[in-house]
Structures are given as C-alpha cells and as structure tokens.
C-alpha cells in the first residue's frame, strides 16, 4: 500500500513511469506552493483517492505503451473524477487506455521544438500562440480518444497537446517541467490553479508547524537520539526536532578525525551554545585512523568508516542510556532523510544508474538498536530544507554549507589516510574555503574543495630542490549533484589560492585545477 504523506492542504499526486524528470515535475508543483507527492505508476485508484489529491499527473517514461513489459496504470483512475495531466509517455498511456491510438513516429522528436496553440484551453491561458518547447519521444498519438480535442500541434505531431475539457483530462507530448521549455512553469501553474483549483498553502511555515505537532504526537514522553554531522540535513533536522520536543532530543556528534578545519568547534558552538541542544561530543579520531591504517582502496575506506561509525554511535547511545534515570526513554532515532531518498523506494526501477560507488553518507544503524525512526524532513527537497533552516534561525554557514561526503576527507585523500596527510589536506582545504568566501564565490558554486593526490613532484623553494605533494582543486557548479560542470573561476582567484597553498601548507609544492565535468568524471575523486 502506498504511504500517504500527512500534509493536509492542497495536494497533487504524480505517478512515476520512470522519467528522468519526475522529480522535476514535483519541484515545479511545489514552486507553486502546492504540495506534491510521487507514487509508483501502478498505485491502485482506491489508494490514490485516499491521498486527498486534487489532481493526478502521469509522468513521462522510456517505454512504449505497446511493449510487453510496459508499465501500465490502474484504469480506474480515470473514473475518480479528478483532473489528470499526462506528460509524454503519460499522455500516450492515457490516450491508449481511453480508446486512442499510439504509433511509432517515423521522425523521432528530441530536443527543442515549436508548439503552435490553435484552440483555447485552460492549460495555455495567458500564454502566446507559439511556444518554445522541449521534446523527448519516439512514439506519438495518431488517433484521439473520444471526448478529446487537439489544442496545440508541432511540425511532427498534430496532437502535441490534447484536452477533454468535460472530464478535465489533458495531455502534453512535450515536457513543460524542464528549463528548456521556458514558459512550461506557467503551463503547470495553469493546471495546478485553474484546472485543479489548488490553493497556495504549502509553505515552510505551515510545514514547521504541522511537523512539530506530528513529532510531539509520535514521540510522546520518550526521548530521541540523532546523529549530528554538521551537514545541512542533520542540522536542520536537529533544529526542527529541538523546536518540537526540546530537551527530549539528544544529538550525538562523532568526530571521526576526518572533518574539515574547525568543523567540530562550529557544530558545538552553533548547537550547544546558541541553540542549547543537548549534545554529546565523541572524539573517535584514534579509532577511525587505526582502522584506516594502510587502506588505499576507496570502497574499503567507505565500508570501514561506515561500520566504525555505527559502532561508535551504538556505544554512545548505550552510554547515554546507562546515565539516564529511565533507560527505556531512548526509543527513537532521528534521521535527516529527504524526499529524493524516499522517491527512490517508489520509483519504477529504483535508481537506474549503475553503481559507481557507495553513497557518500555513512550507512544505516544496526537493527539490534531497535529504535523507531523519526524522519521530520522526509517530505522535503534540498532547497526546502534550506528554507526551513533559515526560518528556524540556523546561520548561513550551516544552511548554505556545501555538500560534504560522510567519509569526510578520507575520500579526498587518494591513497593511505594518515595524520600527516590529513593535516596537509585540511590546511589546503581551509585556504580554498577562505578564499572562495572572501571573493564571494563560495555560495555561487555547488562545491569547492581540495584533493590530495598520491603524486610527488620536483619543485624549487628558496633555491633548494623540493620533492613534495600535489593538491588538486575541484570547483563545480550543479543544480542537484547528478550532473556538474567545472567552474571558470577568475585566473586571479585561482592564482591566489594556489600561491597561498604552496606558501602556507608545508609539504605541497604544486597545485592543479580539475577541469573535468560530470559525467564522465564524478564530483568527488573517490
């Protein structure tokens, strides 16, 4: 059975047929200040009705409606009396099930195109007759179902947009959700407001208020423990839970010795001194570095760090429980799970990408802990999490912190992880962050960091020959981390960063700039 999110205002449901743009559709709806929820393509109509949704969107997908294993929809959804918008494959599927005909197109449409609106429709209200759009399809609708009329066409398709006004069923052969359809957001807004009659009641203020009430109801008088990393997700989760339950929350901050410069101090200051959150600090540097001694393989590093984190966290919870007057009160574990993580479990095929490397974050906690989960951010996308953090009073240095891998600097050191190599990388990375912030570039990019290479080269310092280490700079721009491009930083800034690292970081005599994009490279080097 599909899990129904508990938001009580206007809501739209998106059925996911495997499109790479499904999450983008959900985000576009939320930009309209209307809540969106993604469910599996085959969610039964009776469950959709129970969600309280005011409309349904059928996403695109890579399949052909006639293919043997093509994902199909519960046809009963067309009897729910709800507005439905089919996009690309979703349109073809709706047309197919309602009596139309879909055929393979002799001329595949992919990329930019021009849409010609020929009949009035709520979808195109206040929009021009000719629109730039983005196509991505090989099949097309060739016969309309009964009750439908064509409202727009392209050079390749007379049925690029169709409508059954009476039943409020609409179909678009193109993708309105992507940036390459410049007026697409307005098309989605028209469906959300004009067709579905949704209200703009999805705000971060309403989310905070409702989530706090739900957490208090879920937790009762019990206590909650949360692994605080200092990253955006766990930090916002901590601030939100503290607002909801106060001293019933205890955060555990594990210093694995792989953190960036002054990171432990910042987390303790922000949450311990400013927010007065109950915080248990565990310095496990020696434990982690002992386990990592002599390990160069990146996947082994990740597994070692993940497993050791679980042990350290488990030990900390056990210690807290022993000190508690009522040991049964620690019954809940909080996690900073976000909506994209939840979506993966409902997707048609999970994550379609091949495994490149294990996830940057450390693994889950052992079942023996038997703690119930509290996930206060599971309804939010990353940008919404940042909005919540700002409303809760978290400082910019936390809210707009760049992504940082769970294994920390260990996966930015190629080869063995030692105290000396950590010192070199930590000092170099601090200079990168300092100069990026001073030049106002830090918050304009996705990530900016240093990597310590397993390469030593000859240099000259003070007329003396040196044979020292090499630092690579990795600075990329991205929207979501799925793709990324290297940033064209001003030469003056690159030069200043390089000069400072070579002059100030003992053990480095060469700095290189990584100008590879993702794909084919990844953002992190390991």
Image (spheres, rainbow, N blue to C red):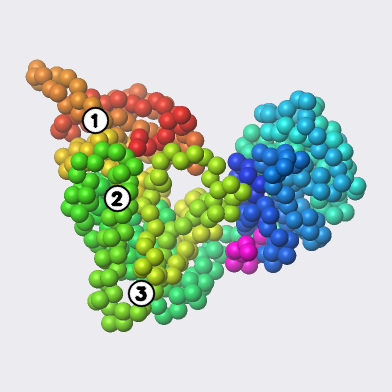
Quote the CA–CA distance across marks 1 and 3. Answer: 45 Å
Give the prevailing secondary structure in the magenta stretch.
loop
Secondary structure category for the residue under label 3: strand
Describe the element under mark 1 as helix, strand or loop: strand
Position of 325 with respect to 5 (left or right) is left
Within 10 Å of the Cα at label 3, are there few (<14), some (14-19), or many (20+) other Cα atoms?
A: many
> Mark number for residue 305?
2
Residue most extreme to the bottom: 325
At 34% across and 59% down in the image, what residue appears?
Answer: 228
Q: Position of residue 62 (x, y in %)?
A: 66, 38
- Name the residue beneath numbered marker 3: 330
C-alpha span from label 3 to label 2: 25 Å
* Magenta extent: 1-12
> Which x, y percent locates residue 422?
21, 41
Crowd rating for badge 1 (residues with CA inside 10 Å; few <14, some 14–19, many 20+): few
Q: Secondary structure at mark 2?
A: helix
Measure the C-alpha gap from mark 1 to mark 2.
20 Å
Q: Quadrant of residue 280?
A: bottom left
What residue appears at the point 23 percent right and 61 percent down from the top-left corner? 282
Query: Residue 454 got which mark?
Result: 1
Drawn side of residue 389 relative to residue 180, left or right: left
Asked if the residue under mark 2 is in contact with the one under mark 3, i.e. CB atoms within 8 Å, the reply is no
For the C terminus, the quadrant is: top left
């Amino acid at each position: 059975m599909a899990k129904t999110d508990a938001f009580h205002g206007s809501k739209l449901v998106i059925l996911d047929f495997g499109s790479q743009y499904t999450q983008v559709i959900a985000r576009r709806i939320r930009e309209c200040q209307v809540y969106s929820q993604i469910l599996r393509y085959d969610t039964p109509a009776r469950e959709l009705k129970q969600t309280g949704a005011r409309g349904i969107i059928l996403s695109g997908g890579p399949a052909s409606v006639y293919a043997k294993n093509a994902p199909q929809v519960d046809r009963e959804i067309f009897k729910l009396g709800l507005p439905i918008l089919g996009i690309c494959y979703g349109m073809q599927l709706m047309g197919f099930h309602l009596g139309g005909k879909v055929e393979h197109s002799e001329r595949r449409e992919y990329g930019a195109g021009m849409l010609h609106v020929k009949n009035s429709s709520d979808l195109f209200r206040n929009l021009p007759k000719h629109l730039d759009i983005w196509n991505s399809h090989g099949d097309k609708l060739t016969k309309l179902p009964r009750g439908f009329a064509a409202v727009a066409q392209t050079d390749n398709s007379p049925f690029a947009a169709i409508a059954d006004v009476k039943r409020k069923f609409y179909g678009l052969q193109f993708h309105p959700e992507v940036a390459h359809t410049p007026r697409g957001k307005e098309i989605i807004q028209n469906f959300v407001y004009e067709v579905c009659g949704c209200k703009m009641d999805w705000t971060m203020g309403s989310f905070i208020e409702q989530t706090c009430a739900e957490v208090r109801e879920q937790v009762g008088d019990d206590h909650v423990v949360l692994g605080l990393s200092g990253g955006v997700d766990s930090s916002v989760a901590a601030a939100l839970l503290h607002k909801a339950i106060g001293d019933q929350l205890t955060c555990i901050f594990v210093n694995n010795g792989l953190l960036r410069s002054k990171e432990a101090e910042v987390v303790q200051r922000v949450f311990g001194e400013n927010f007065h959150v109950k915080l248990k600090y565990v310095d496990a540097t020696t434990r982690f570095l002992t386990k990592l001694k002599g390990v160069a393989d990146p996947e082994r590093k990740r597994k070692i760090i993940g497993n050791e984190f679980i042990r350290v966290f488990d030990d900390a919870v056990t210690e807290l429980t022993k000190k508690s007057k009522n040991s049964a009160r620690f019954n809940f574990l909080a996690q900073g799970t976000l909506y994209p993580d939840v979506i993966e479990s409902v997707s048609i095929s999970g994550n379609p990408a091949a495994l490149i490397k294990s996830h940057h974050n450390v693994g889950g906690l052992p079942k023996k802990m038997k703690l119930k989960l509290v996930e206060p951010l599971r309804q939010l996308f990353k940008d919404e999490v940042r909005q919540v953090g700002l409303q809760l009073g978290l400082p910019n240095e936390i809210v707009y912190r760049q992504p940082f891998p769970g294994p920390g600097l260990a996966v930015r050191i190629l080869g063995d992880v030692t105290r000396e190599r950590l010192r070199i990388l930590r000092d170099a990375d601090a200079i990168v962050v300092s100069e990026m912030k001073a030049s106002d570039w830090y918050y304009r990019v996705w990530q900016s960091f240093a990597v310590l290479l397993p390469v030593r080269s000859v240099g000259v310092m003070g007329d003396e020959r040196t044979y020292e280490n090499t630092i690579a700079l990795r600075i990329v721009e991205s929207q979501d981390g799925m793709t990324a491009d290297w940033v064209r930083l001003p030469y003056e800034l690159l030069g200043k960063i390089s000069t400072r690292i070579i002059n100030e970081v003992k053990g480095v005599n060469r700095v290189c700039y990584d100008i590879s994009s993702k794909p084919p490279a990844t953002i992190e080097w390991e």
